[in-house]
Image: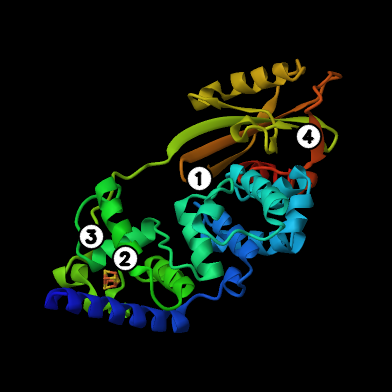
Amino acid sequence: MTPTRRRSDRDDAARRAALLRWYRVHHRDLPWRRTRDPYAIWVSEIMLQQTRVETVIPFFERFLARFPTVGALARARETAVLTAWSGLGYYRRARNLHRGARLVVREHAGAVPQSLDGLRALPGIGAYTAAAIASIAFGVPAAAVDGNVVRVIARWDGRKGRRDDPALRRAVTARAEALAPGPRPGDWTQALMELGATVCLARDPLCERCPVERWCRARRSGRPDRYPEAAGLQTPRKEHRVMLLVRRGRRVLLLPDPADGGATVAPPSMAVSRPPAARRAATFLARANGVLDPPRGPLRTIRHRTYSHDYTIEVWEVAAGSDQHGGNARWATAAGVQRLPARAATLKALKGL
Ligand code: SF4
């Protein structure tokens, strides 16, 4: 081994120890960090995909109270699972989790697989999630590499290149895999994530509070925020929608929401190219649901942002005719909708109506 290599190994070991010490003292107290139950950690990792920690906490606690074990989740009906997920978005995650639980019960006697391959064979679990569960729940030295970890390691090593460049990701992943073996693999995974989420921030890294500052090349450069370079920013697509409440007394018509492949329910709605076309769209939706009377509205206009979309939703209403609706139709009060699987935008649009 060359002297340079020896020095770099020593630096890696010292940095690991410093980061683990910092994590032990400074980590946020999150409900999924109070357990080693692989099922609970699996649920948390799925919920955290594309969703903020603060949003996930109440959903995680309610979900675990409702389905405390993998067996309980496997036995549940899909509607009950989707209802518990209601408002969290990306419902495919809930369906995959449910299918995964059934598979674990059927093929693994109810024990969540410990190996990366076993975890990756479950629906909805990719390389990152498998590594996170394996390291946190089972102490497997696996590298869980997400956007935060790419940023942190790229900064340590002073790697330039765009954040979304596959070559940068490959290089950082190889480095993360080399760093993974060592004491306390689960804490190491979480410490890296925690550093990226609370200190090594994308635009404004808090280097003066960083426990591994002395081993960071980006910090020495004076402009750590430039490592790695910003990816082309993805601006959420603006979409103007009209939602029609077809009313029967206090209840409204709900149909399977095509935006989720029918996993959730929502009042009829459609996108409009320009706001002045809203009345025409509301009339079209009324007729499509057997009502000839002109709709009234907008009753309210709400804004709702997701990672990919920036929605403006006009809510209109009309009294139901004496029509026949298909077997998929349901009727619920605004309060009742809160207990059904529905997207956050739907719940927001119906709240209090
Ligand atoms: S010193 Fe700054 S840039 Fe480097 S890892 Fe710490 S917070 Fe990130």
Whole-percent x and y of residue 246? 76, 28
In the displayed structure, 270 sits above or below 46; it is above
Tag shown at residue 178: 2
Q: Mark 3 vs mark 4: which is more N-terminal?
A: 3
Label whose residue precedes the other's in the sequence (1 or 3): 3
Q: Residue at x 70, y 17 (%)?
A: 288
The label nearer to you, 3 versus 4, is 3
Specify the quadrant that holds the C terminus.
top right
Q: Are marks 4 and 2 in contact (CB under 8 Å)?
A: no
Mark nearer the N terminus (4 vs 1): 4
Foreground mark, 3 or 2, reads 2
Q: Amino acid at mark 1?
A: Thr
Q: Which residue is mark 4?
A: 252
Left or right side of 227 for 303: right
Under mark 3, the amino acid is Tyr
> How many residues crowd mark 4 within 10 Å: few (<14), some (14–19), many (20+)?
many
Spatial CA span between label 4 and label 2? 56 Å
Q: Where is residue 37 shown, x and y percent of the image?
A: 64, 68
Image quadrant where one finds the N terminus: bottom left
Q: Which residue is found at the position 69% from the left and 35% from the top?
A: 266
Mark 2 is on which residue type?
Answer: Ala
How far is disc 3 from disc 2 in space, using C-alphas?
20 Å
Task: Determine which residue is flagged by label 3.
Answer: 227
Q: Mark 2 and mark 1 in contact? Answer it, CB < 8 Å.
A: no
Q: Is residue 353 above or below residue 175?
A: above
As drawn, which residue projects farthest toward the left? 3
Foreground residue, 208 or 185?
185
Choose between 107 and 120: the one closer to the eye.
107
Say the numbered circle drawn on residue 86: none
Using the image, determine if residue 291 lies above or below residue 11. above
